[in-house]
Amino acid sequence: MHTLPSYLDPQHLGPWGIYLQQIDRVTPYLGSLTRWVETLKRPKRALVVDVPIALDNGTIAHFEGYRVQHNMSRGPGKGGVRFHQDVTLPEVMALSAWMSIKNAAVNVPFGGAKGGIRVDPRTLSQAELERLTRRYTSEIGIIIGPTKDIPAPDVNTNEKVMAWMMDTYATNIGETATGVVTGKPISVGGSLGRREATGRGVFTIGTEAARRTGLSIAGARIAVQGFGNVGSVAARLFSEAGAHIVAIQDHTGSVANDKGLDMAALQAHVAAEGGVKGFKSAQDISSSDFWSTKCDILIPAALEGQITQDNAGLIQAQMVIEGANGPTTPEADDILKDKGVLVVPDVIANAGGVTVSYFEWVQDFSSFFWSEEEINERLVSIMKKAFASIWDTAQQHKVSLRTATYIVACTRILTARDLRGLYP
Ligand code: GLU
């Protein structure tokens, strides 16, 4: 008889199983809070919804949508919504759990949540995409809200999608409710600096990690996987700081230039062609050549499960800064550790996005908006402070930065759990 693996089984394949292994790795460092650790291995609430829409040709299509609230001990749920053909419930569970860890790591007062729709948005017209977004928002409307759970952009969702989500929710409840989602356009309650925040955070954390290991960013060689909202901004900021972006891979292919790729020209090429492939001032290279690029820093900024036991051995960088969520498997983590590669984990490296989401949410509540300078200053200061305490924790316990981040974050989450106590 075919039996599905329990979601508590660390052998569960994919991102959720990886997350469970990460929790097992942190458990020995939780002291008396270990009593509560099981809380982290189960999502608080998981909603699966049917999202039917009328296609432009008049037929009806059904899509599967999810919203998972992993933990809310420290505040309302917070995390993005992704539209991708491979999205599954266990994947969204993992992504929601990583949001709990991330939000606690930078100490913003949120729990962790995530949502998604199993759809390839490139196959839909704008009108179909709008109907899909609005129906999905309506279906998950029973559990989201400015003080309940606040979605945001993620893979293949953007400001426009957030505007539709906000409008749908507000229409349904009959109130202005800008604080129900973050990552909105500026003219409907969005925040300056939010679009660039994740990439800026990757740059800030990368610079901090480099400083502590004696690596100079000026002149450093960097390879980036993913040229979306995270990878393109991080690459540009590193390049402006004097680094050479020597290779980039996206869903269309991999390109390299030993002297450094021209970021503005590449950005224009991607806007026109939809991907990096065929960029004139570069060579097209194979995927394995991309992973074995001679570089100082590698930034995976695409999807999860990209650095595995199959390609970790190829990596020549001295530092991996995780712009994506969950790009490195635990086996690959161990291979990189043995090779002496420093891995700066997703749950701190890409926390810049949700940090400015927190600022957006605060600004929406007070209807008082800050300058971009103020936002960037506060972002950098929060991220530096968070990274310093993670770095010190890693030194103190002689553990990886990932385990150190989990020690800091899980201690905060479970302390809140402990103080609140169990109801009833
Ligand atoms: N989707 C982003 C992340 O994975 C941002 C989430 C948010 O701003 O709520 O961190």
Image (cartoon, helix red, strand yellow):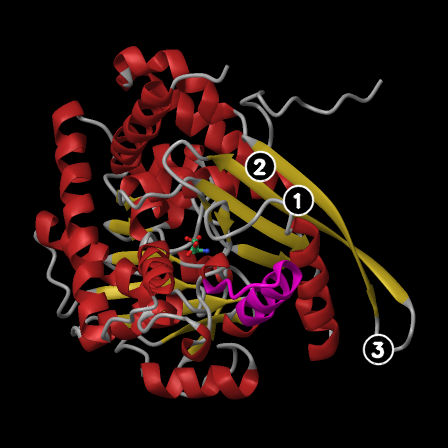
How far separated are the C-alphas under marks 3 and 2?
35 Å
Taking depth in this image into account, of 318 and 350 the one nearest to the observer is 350
- Residue 216: percent from left, percent from top: 10, 61
Mark 3 neighbour density, 10 Å: few (under 14) some (14–19) many (20 or more): few
Q: Which residues are magenta?
A: 161-178
Q: Which amino acid does the dot numbered 2 rest on?
A: Gly
SS type, badge 2 = loop
Q: Earlier in the sequence, mark 1 or mark 2?
A: 2
Query: What numbered label is drawn on residue 14?
Result: 2
Which quarter of the rendered picture does the N terminus lie within?
top right
- Residue 353: percent from left, percent from top: 36, 59
Q: Earlier in the sequence, mark 3 or mark 1?
A: 3
View extreme (front): residue = 174
How far separated are the C-alphas under marks 3 and 1?
26 Å
User: Which residue position holds label 1?
Assistant: 88
SS type, badge 1 = loop
168 is within the stretch colored magenta: yes
109 up-or-down from 411: above or below? below
User: Which residue position holds label 3?
Assistant: 56
